[in-house]
DNA sequence: CACTTAACCCACCAAAATAGTCGGCTATTG
DNA sequence: CAATAGCCGACTATTTTGGTGGGTTAAGTG
């Protein structure tokens, strides 16, 4: 189990999704604005989340993403696993080929730690996070604070106007 | 608490040190050969470990490194903290300035996880690892398997001989 | 139906972190 | 004094991370 900012982004986005997609799907543009993550980077993360069957994408106007399952069925460990490369790709690859095809000294230690972290994160679901007061407050604040940001380069006509002016 | 291969290298090297430095100091060249880590990279890691007061360096022939404390006083969390940059340098810096000076959605989640991991690793000492049968076996095997590797570029005269030949 | 929306896809890019290289200097020992 | 082995710093290659910019495709709406 690797822990990087990538996983953090994914979990944050999924939590935002869980919070806002109760009624209708949520666009990545909205999530990007609220959580200050770049839209294109979100697209990449959600491509993986979709392939891992954690979210559903709905195209067209009024579309966006919604959770593929119930918030109490989606745990944090699975989200992180979905966006990070296959957990064991690095060196100590699940089996003990860490040091020229044999186990490295600390193989067992890292296995134990991985289990520990995975178990902890598997025990936490989106539903549990949603219940927390503090998270609800923060989400509210984000809804208010978020100005309507327009991604200019996605609007060719605005962009060319701008170019005329400059 | 960040978990990277850097920390893994450090812990592996420290465990090797704990295992071999009972009688006399151990050279980084030996550790590099046994654990297949580059010598210069080890030097960098050990510079930090020394500054963090976890190892003592002894110069000159017969020198090398030995542990600064007893194996049962050195825990894994401290080793990792010694080689990785200050834990909170990234985004969610200890305090809640993750999203333009306010807490990001998942701030509390990561705090909880960090504590979890830290506690787990603080509870594991080098002494405990040394007791494990499997680790003893692996260490033995490494002692036998390790051929005497000579770092040629560290031996200018060998290097120039080689240049003459080629 | 044309138009807009927003997912989907891909190739490319910049900054950072990771891992390693190289060369030289310094203390210690024999 | 010569060999050893720590110490130090600058430089480099590779990988990961995060982000751009250009599409295409499916689905709703006037």
Image: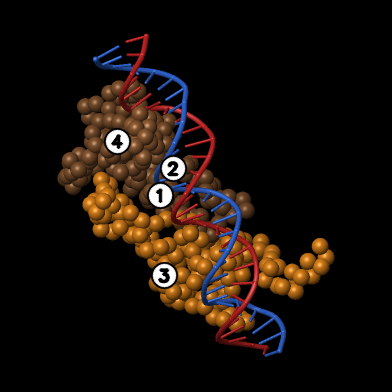
Chain colours: A brown, B orange, C red, D blue
For the residues beneath circles 1 and 2, the answer to whether they share a chain is yes
Q: Which residue is mark 4?
A: A150
Q: Nearer the viewer, mark 4 or mark 3?
A: 4
Give the CA distance from mark 2 to mark 4.
30 Å
Quick check: marks 3 and 1 in contact, CB under 8 Å?
no
Residue found at x 46% / y 70%:
B48
First reached walking from the N terminus: tag 1 or tag 2: 1
Do circles 4 and 1 both sit on a common chain? yes
Q: Which residue is mark 3?
A: B74
The local crowd at label 2, few if under 14, some if 14 to 19, many if 20 or more residues have their Cα within 10 Å, is some
Q: Earlier in the sequence, mark 2 or mark 4?
A: 2
Label 2 close to label 4 by CB (< 8 Å): no
The answer to whether residue A84 is left or right of residue A21 is right
Instruction: Pick whichever of labels 4 and 1 is earlier in the sequence.
Output: 1
Residue drawn at the location 36% of the way across and 40% of the way down: A166
- The residues bearing labels 3 and 1 have C-alpha atoms spaced at a distance of 26 Å
What whole-number distance in Å separates the C-alpha atoms at marks 4 and 1?
Answer: 29 Å
Q: Same chain for labels 4 and 3? Say yes or no.
A: no
Labelled disc at residue A4: 1
The quarter in which the N terminus of chain B is drawn is: bottom left
The reply, left or right, for residue A118 in relation to residue B41 is: left
Contact, mark 1 vs mark 2 (Cβ under 8 Å): yes
Work out whether disc 3 and disc 1 sit on a shared chain.
no
Q: Is residue C11 above or below residue B21?
A: above
């Amino acid at each position: 189990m690797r822990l990087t900012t990538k996983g953090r982004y994914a979990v944050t986005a999924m939590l935002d999704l869980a919070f806002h997609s109760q009624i209708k799907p949520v666009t990545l543009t909205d999530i990007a604005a609220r959580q200050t993550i770049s839209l294109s980077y979100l697209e990449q993360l959600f491509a993986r989340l979709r392939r891992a069957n954690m979210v559903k994408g709905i195209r067209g106007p009024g579309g966006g993403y919604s959770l593929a399952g119930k918030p109490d069925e989606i745990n944090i460990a699975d989200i992180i696993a979905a966006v990070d490369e296959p957990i064991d790709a690095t060196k100590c690859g699940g089996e003990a080929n860490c040091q020229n095809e044999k186990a490295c000294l600390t193989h067992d230690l890292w296995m134990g730690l991985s289990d520990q972290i995975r178990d902890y994160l598997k025990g936490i679901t989106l539903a549990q996070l949603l219940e927390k007061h503090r998270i609800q407050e923060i989400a509210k604040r984000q809804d208010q604070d978020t100005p309507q940001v327009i991604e200019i380069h996605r609007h060719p006509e605005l962009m060319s106007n701008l170019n005329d002016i400059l």
